Image: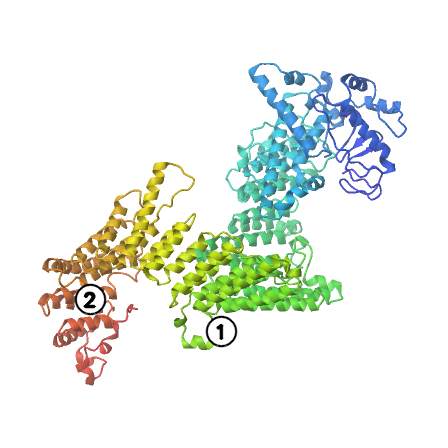
């Protein structure tokens, strides 16, 4: 880098404290000195197509007024006429100095000795290598703004497009004529400098302070909202696209002009940087392709000038033209065989003879630029592309010799970038694999250390061990792997639980490995000294916090937090309470290896993660205890002047919200009371103007806790719970507490809005739609346990009206659905259900849940015909909408849930034709393709309706529905319990066939009763579920009931069936008191005694005299308490 021309110590792009220069371009002796090179003013011959526009932000101090004037006036030559321009090029370049004199003749001679880049002389068009390195360069110095960058880009794009079109159609145009003379823009040094400046602008626009100041007002509101990130990503993508289009046009002109070089190493660097920063994976893959071209060009140029090695052989060895990973053994271990996206991303042939500036150390294909593309792959969650570039760096550093291999030597940042890429895709296994490879790499080349133990001991001093950043990235990968399965917490399987737990344990194993590596005497290289930090422990805690195996994860998270607190205190005492500095450095190393500056000192986020683990485990009491600990630690830190090992632990609003959420999810009647107390404490901390302040989430969470308490039936609390939790508030009392809190929030906001709260005007919280919806849900929950449920529904409807009138908050679907649910649970009969329907029709956009709630309201009110009418109305709306075509408001298509709700309404209806209407609806669902197919619940609801009907043919119809159900689930995965319940429904229909059904229907019911029990025994139950292998206790009880009801008393067939079923029931261990009582009522006492005596001998092998019931109880053998225990030791009926 070139320093200040006034010989100060400042370097490029740094403000010089001596000469007060802000620009990165200096003018000295009539020569422009840039950050990358120097070239005379003659190289800035203007182009007739492009009036060069460069900003003139130069210093105005007296020491530089003369040089600044010279530079500005030299740029003003672009406005001169063509004749004046030709005269200046032929004679001399005139500049205005402080006295306005012409330049000296010596300067003119120096100008003549430096010819421009474009020359019509053929000998000058093909200079040798030495002349090529000595001629003036055209490298970027970044002086233009956005408007000039867009103007430059538009110029080259228009010329490139017009040039391509003229060459295809054969028609000459003005652009084609210009391209054939020496005034073409790509033949003009000044225009090429502007092009490189434009590429640099597109590559670093976000880092340009001038541009940030210009767009500060435009971006302010974006960064204050969630759209800030989207705005930045769109800007980066636009920059990448503009840079790529400009570079493509420059590449076109470079390949067209065989005698002159258009592209420079700076252009390659800028376009690669711009593409690598883009949030579009397509752009990153193009950056990969251009990067490989850039490396290939550098190797060709380097080998041609200094190396004796054959360039072609070197390129074939490194396979730079093919973006596939190298095929050597080391790279196969490191990189996947998956081909990166760069293989077909950009079809630009590799140019030749580009401009290279050996003084420009920043614009070369070094490890920094390669790592930038790797970071682009990591941001796009494409670890294979990042690992392929890492493999390329290893191959380059191993193949090149001399000092050039240092340019491509992979460092800790490269390996950590690949690990981070795998972390973003929740792949802990591959992240740890790359970490292991990083530990085996050499510092010199990045290649693996030899396996020979002797050589390995010698190479230990050059071992490139992993640092703290790499370990933390790998631990974060395992933590994200555990978090990946947390989305299936509700329906977690044993396999997902085991996988989540294993991921958390792997994260902790890496933490323990870091401690084992922390030994000052184990390695000679300090790079191998590794010490965990707060980031390490926080990541492992996060892994256990999101683990599906709770409370196992919560307990481990708490243990790690306790361990971190002890380390923080120990580290703080060692560094601040010990005077011997040499002794301090023996235990903990605070710097080096990428370790966090805070060391072991935990912060608020660490504690919040443990609190979230407690909330996930449902342990609200422990969460509240940790909150109290945080408050105590923060108070102790304040007493020490804001320092100490726990100076970064300060409860914030999120801390309180996590604890409030833990109480809101807790079952029982004390959740609302405890959450409200925590909220009161948070409000008191807010009153000090220094503590956290509650937000709308805090208040909504407490409202949710009151809503949960309102769902608890007051009569369900036992005397023990009432004595231990005398402060529990449940039922309608909890609902009114929620309303009280809502009034408080609403009143505070209105008072603050009117300016009556003074300093707290900005701290007032405005209730939102969730606040009102949660309060409405509290009254809906209380309505199901309240004697006067109608009053609860009226309160809910009043809140719905108030949110529209007072604060102008439009009710959403959740608010309306809560009111509908309150009326449905109010036990108000048909009037309440009709009121719910009225509210439904007043909604602008009702949802499927809204319709289902009203249908359920009619179900509870014995209004199945009204529920069926609503379903028919929805079906008609769908038909009418399909006839009208597309409309602004699409109709709601009834789902299977809504059809099942109507079937449920028919099942609970007192209508005489309810069961037949349910069968008709089921038949319509099976036959109509436009309707949803019946599921398991649909058939079960119809069977339930047939159980309660008094029709004489209920048994035959139930058997038909059962057969249709078994045919529909054949080959599907259905829970065995569902199938068993369906068989029991048929047994119920047979057992309770009306006595006046007639002999024909009763005989059919008896036949179906026997065949159903037989089929239930012969059904192919799954072998992996031993809990269900045939009839259960309910099945045998219904069979005994059916035999008693359908067969004549003391008939031989009846006694035989009863004995057979009872023997089978006792043999399986399913006997209970219900079955025993029904069996004894169906047979005479004498027959029961004889049968039991024979059954005991048959099943136990013991006679009556050896029974363990005592000789004085032989006559009470048929009592249930005296029966053998093995007859009723399996799955007792609940």
Figure check: 404 above or below 1078:
above
Total label count?
2
Determine crowd level at label 2: few under 14, some 14-19, many 20+ residues with C-alpha closer than 10 A.
some
Figure check: 610 above or below 59:
below
**Which image quarter: residue 1036?**
bottom left
Residue pictured at 58% horizontal, 64% vertical: 561
Q: Is residue 242 visible?
A: yes
Q: CA distance from mark 1 to mark 2?
A: 53 Å
Seen as rendered, the residue at the extreme top is 171
Dot 2 lies on which element?
helix
Q: Mark 1 sits on what residue?
A: 727
Image quadrant in which the C terminus is located: bottom left
x, y percentage for residue 1052? Answer: 9, 67
Question: What's the mark number on residue 622?
Answer: none
x, y percentage for residue 908? Answer: 28, 59
Question: What's the mark number on residue 1064?
Answer: 2
Q: Is residue 786 left or right of residue 1058?
A: right
- Which residue is more in the foreground, 1124 or 914? 914
Q: Is residue 307 visible?
A: no
x, y percentage for residue 229? Answer: 59, 45
Of the two numbered discs 1 and 2 in the rendering, the one whose residue sits closer to the viewer:
1
Residue pictured at 26% horizontal, 60% vertical: 1029
Q: Are marks 1 and 2 in contact (CB under 8 Å)?
A: no
Q: Earlier in the sequence, mark 1 or mark 2?
A: 1
Dot 1 lies on which element?
loop
């Amino acid at each position: 880098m070139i320093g200040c021309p006034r010989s100060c110590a400042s370097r490029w792009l740094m403000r010089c404290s001596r000469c007060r220069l802000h620009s990165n371009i200096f003018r000295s002796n009539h020569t422009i000195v840039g950050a990358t090179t120097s070239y005379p003013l003659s190289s800035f011959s203007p182009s007739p197509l492009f009036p060069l526009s460069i900003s003139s932000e130069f210093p105005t101090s007296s020491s530089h007024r003369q040089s600044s004037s010279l530079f500005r006036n030299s740029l003003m030559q672009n406005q001169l006429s063509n004749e004046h321009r030709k005269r200046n090029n032929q004679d001399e370049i005139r500049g205005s100095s402080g006295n306005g004199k012409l330049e000296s003749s010596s300067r003119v001679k120096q100008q003549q000795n430096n010819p421009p880049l474009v020359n019509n002389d053929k000998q000058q068009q093909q200079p040798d290598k030495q002349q090529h390195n000595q001629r003036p360069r055209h490298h970027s110095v970044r002086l233009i703004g956005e408007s000039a960058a867009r103007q430059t880009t538009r110029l080259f794009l228009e010329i490139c497009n017009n040039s391509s079109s003229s060459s295809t159609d054969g028609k000459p145009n003005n652009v084609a004529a210009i391209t054939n003379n020496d005034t073409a823009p790509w033949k003009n040094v000044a225009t090429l400098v502007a092009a490189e400046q434009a590429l640099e602008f597109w590559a670093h626009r976000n880092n340009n302070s001038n541009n940030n100041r210009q767009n500060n007002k435009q971006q302010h509101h974006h960064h204050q909202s969630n759209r800030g990130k989207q705005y930045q990503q769109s800007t980066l993508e636009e920059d990448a696209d503009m840079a790529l289009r400009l570079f493509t046009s420059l590449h076109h002109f470079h390949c067209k002009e065989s005698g002159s070089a258009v592209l420079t190493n700076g252009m390659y660097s800028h376009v690669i940087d711009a593409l690598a920063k883009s949030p579009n994976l397509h752009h990153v893959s193009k950056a990969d392709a251009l990067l490989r071209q850039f490396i290939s060009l550098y190797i060709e140029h380097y080998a041609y000038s200094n190396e004796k090695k054959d360039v072609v052989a070197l390129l074939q060895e490194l396979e730079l033209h093919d973006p596939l990973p190298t095929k050597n053994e080391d790279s196969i271990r490191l990189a996947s065989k998956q081909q990166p996206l760069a293989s077909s991303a950009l079809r630009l042939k590799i140019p030749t003879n580009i401009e290279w500036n050996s003084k420009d150390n920043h614009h070369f294909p070094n490890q920094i630029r390669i790592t930038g593309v790797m970071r682009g792959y990591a941001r796009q969650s494409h670890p294979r592309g990042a690992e392929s570039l890492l493999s390329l760096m290893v191959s380059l550093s191993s193949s090149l010799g001399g000092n050039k291999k240092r340019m491509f030597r992979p460092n800790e940042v490269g390996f950590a970038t690949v690990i981070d890429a795998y972390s973003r895709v929740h792949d802990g296994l591959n992240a740890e694999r790359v970490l292991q490879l990083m530990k085996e790499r050499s510092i010199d080349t990045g290649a693996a250390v030899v396996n020979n133990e002797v050589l390995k001991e010698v190479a230990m001093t050059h071992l490139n061990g992993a640092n703290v950043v790499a370990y933390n990235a790998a631990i974060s990968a395992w933590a994200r792997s555990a978090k990946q399965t947390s989305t299936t917490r509700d329906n977690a399987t044993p396999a997902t639980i085991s996988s989540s737990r294993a991921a958390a344990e792997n994260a902790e194993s890496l933490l323990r490995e870091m401690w084992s590596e922390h030994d000052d005497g184990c390695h000679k290289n300090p790079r191998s000294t590794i010490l965990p930090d707060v980031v390490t422990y926080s990541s492992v805690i996060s892994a256990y916090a999101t683990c599906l195996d709770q409370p196992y994860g919560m307990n481990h998270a708490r243990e790690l937090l306790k361990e971190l607190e002890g380390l923080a205190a120990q580290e703080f005492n060692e560094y601040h309470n010990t005077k011997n500095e040499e002794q301090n450095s023996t235990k903990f190393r605070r710097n080096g290896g990428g370790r966090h500056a805070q060391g072991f000192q935990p912060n608020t986020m660490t504690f919040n993660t443990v609190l979230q683990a407690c909330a996930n485990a449902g342990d609200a009491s422990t969460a509240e205890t940790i909150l109290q600990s945080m408050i105590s630690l923060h108070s102790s830190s304040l007493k020490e002047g804001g320092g100490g090992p726990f100076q970064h632990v300060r409860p914030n609003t999120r801390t309180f919200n996590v604890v409030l959420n833990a109480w809101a999810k807790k079952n029982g009647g004390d959740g609302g009371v405890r959450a409200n107390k925590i909220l009161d404490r948070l409000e008191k901390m807010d009153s000090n103007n220094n503590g956290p302040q509650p937000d709308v989430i805090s208040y909504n969470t407490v409202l949710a806790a009151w809503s949960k308490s309102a769902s608890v039936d007051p009569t369900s609390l036992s005397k023990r719970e009432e004595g231990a939790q005398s402060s529990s508030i449940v039922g309608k009392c909890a609902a009114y507490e929620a309303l009280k809190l809502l009034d408080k929030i609403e009143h505070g906001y209105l008072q603050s809005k009117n300016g009556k709260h003074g300093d707290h005007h900005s701290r007032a919280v405005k209730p939102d739609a969730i606040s009102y919806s949660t309060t409405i849900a509290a009254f809906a929950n209380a309505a199901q346990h309240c004697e006067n449920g109608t009053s609860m529904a009226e309160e809910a409807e009043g809140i719905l009206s108030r949110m529209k009138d007072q604060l102008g908050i439009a009710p959403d679907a959740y608010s309306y659905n809560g009111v509908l649910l309150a009326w449905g649970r109010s036990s108000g009969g048909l009037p309440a259900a009709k009121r719910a329907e009225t509210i439904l029709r007043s909604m602008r956009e009702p949802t499927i849940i809204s319709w289902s709630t009203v249908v359920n309201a009619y179900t509870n009110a014995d209004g199945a015909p009204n529920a069926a009418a609503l379903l028919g109305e929805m079906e008609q709306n769908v038909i009418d909408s399909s006839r009208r075509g597309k409309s602004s408001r699409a109709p709601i298509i009834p789902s299977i849930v809504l059809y099942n709700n109507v079937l449920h309404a028919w099942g609970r209806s007192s209508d005489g034709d309810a069961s037949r209407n349910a069968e008709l609806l089921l038949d319509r669902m099976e036959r109509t393709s436009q309707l949803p197919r019946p599921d398991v619940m649909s058939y079960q609801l119809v069977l339930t309706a047939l159980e309660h009907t008094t029709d004489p043919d209920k048994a035959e119809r139930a058997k038909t529905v059962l057969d249709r159900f078994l045919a529909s689930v054949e080959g599907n995965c259905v829970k065995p319990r569902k199938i068993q319940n369906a068989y029991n429904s048929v047994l119920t229909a047979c057992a309770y066939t009306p006595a006046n059904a007639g002999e024909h229907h009763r005989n059919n019911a008896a036949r179906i009763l026997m065949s159903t029990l037989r089929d239930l025994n012969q059904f192919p139950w799954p072998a992996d579920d031993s809990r269900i292998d045939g009839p259960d206790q309910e099945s045998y009880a219904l069979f005994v009931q059916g035999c008693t009801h359908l067969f004549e008393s003391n008939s031989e067939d009846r006694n035989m069936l009863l004995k057979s079923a009872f023997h089978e029931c006792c043999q399986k261990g399913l006997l209970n008191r219900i079955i025993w009582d029904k069996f004894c009522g169906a047979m005479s006492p004498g027959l029961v005694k004889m049968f039991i005596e024979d059954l005991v001998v048959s099943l136990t092998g013991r006679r009556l005299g050896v029974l363990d019931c005592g000789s004085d109880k032989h006559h009470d053998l048929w009592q249930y308490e005296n029966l053998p225990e093995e007859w009723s030791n399996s799955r007792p009926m609940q």
